[in-house]
Image (cartoon, rainbow, N blue to C red):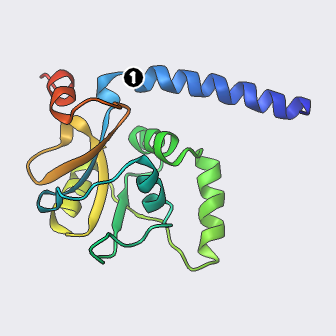
Amino acid sequence: MKLGQKLFVAIYCLMADSTTVLASHESDVLAVVVPANSAHRVIDLEMLNEIYRRKRQYWDDGLRIEPVNLPSKSAKRILFSQQVLRLSTDELESYWGEMYFHGIMPPHVLSSEEAVLRFVASTPSSIGYVSLCSVDSRVSVVLTVNAPGETFEKIKAQSCKH
């Protein structure tokens, strides 16, 4: 391994460690949401990765999946990209540059968590992510990011005390 590669790996590991520490706070738990009437959808992290990289474009019932993102500078989007897509901002930019030439466009970007909630609630085949504390009855949580093995109800009760 060349010196530059070793340096990159060392920096990456340090960044990953600091991300893990930051992401362990309950306030950093993301909820992956679908419309309230689509709670029957079952997904895992690998499927979510495929959806957001546009490698999986249809739900099992044949509906075209409509994934939505938060803005690229959003801390939640960066956390989502690191934890689910396992790609940095630069790597994602390169990935989408390549996919564009194959006619594949990235997920739509919405301006806020409220915009994500409204879109997901009103679009039957959609999926998005928001802060766990932003979840309300308009959507159903199908997965949480940064809280493996914890139930949604337990995490929300611990995280969203006002």
The quadrant of the rendering that contains the C terminus is top left
Q: In the rendered view, would you say 54 is above or below 20?
A: below
What residue do we see at 61% from left, 27% from top? Answer: 15
Instruction: Residue 52: give x, y in percent of width and height.
Output: 45, 59
Instruction: Residue 48: give x, y in percent of width and height.
Output: 41, 54
Q: Is residue 73 visible?
A: no
Question: SS at mark 1?
Answer: loop
Instruction: Residue 77: give x, y in percent of width and height.
Output: 43, 45
Q: How many marks?
A: 1
Extreme left residue here?
Answer: 137
Extreme right residue here?
Answer: 2
Question: In screen coordinates, is 127 left or right of 133?
Answer: right
The quadrant of the rendering that contains the N terminus is top right
What residue do we see at 42% from left, 56% from top? Answer: 47
Q: Which residue is mark 1?
A: 24
What residue do we see at 57% from left, 22% from top? Answer: 17
- At label 1, counting other C-alpha atoms closer than 10 Å, the crowd grade (few under 14, some 14-19, many 20 or more) is few
Q: Give the camera-side residue of 64 and 115.
A: 64
Q: Give the camera-side residue of 141 and 108.
A: 141
Query: Which quadrant would residue 152 be assigned to in this image?
Result: top left
| Kind of residue indicated by mark 1 | Ser
Q: In the rendered view, would you say 32 is above or below 144?
A: below
Question: In screen coordinates, is 123 left or right of 137?
Answer: right
Q: In the rendered view, would you say 74 is above or below 70?
A: above
Q: In the rendered view, would you say 91 is above or below 100?
A: above
Question: In screen coordinates, is 16 left or right of 108?
Answer: right
Query: Which quadrant would residue 116 be assigned to in this image?
Result: bottom left
What residue do we see at 27% from left, 65% from top? Answer: 126
Q: Is residue 2 visible?
A: yes
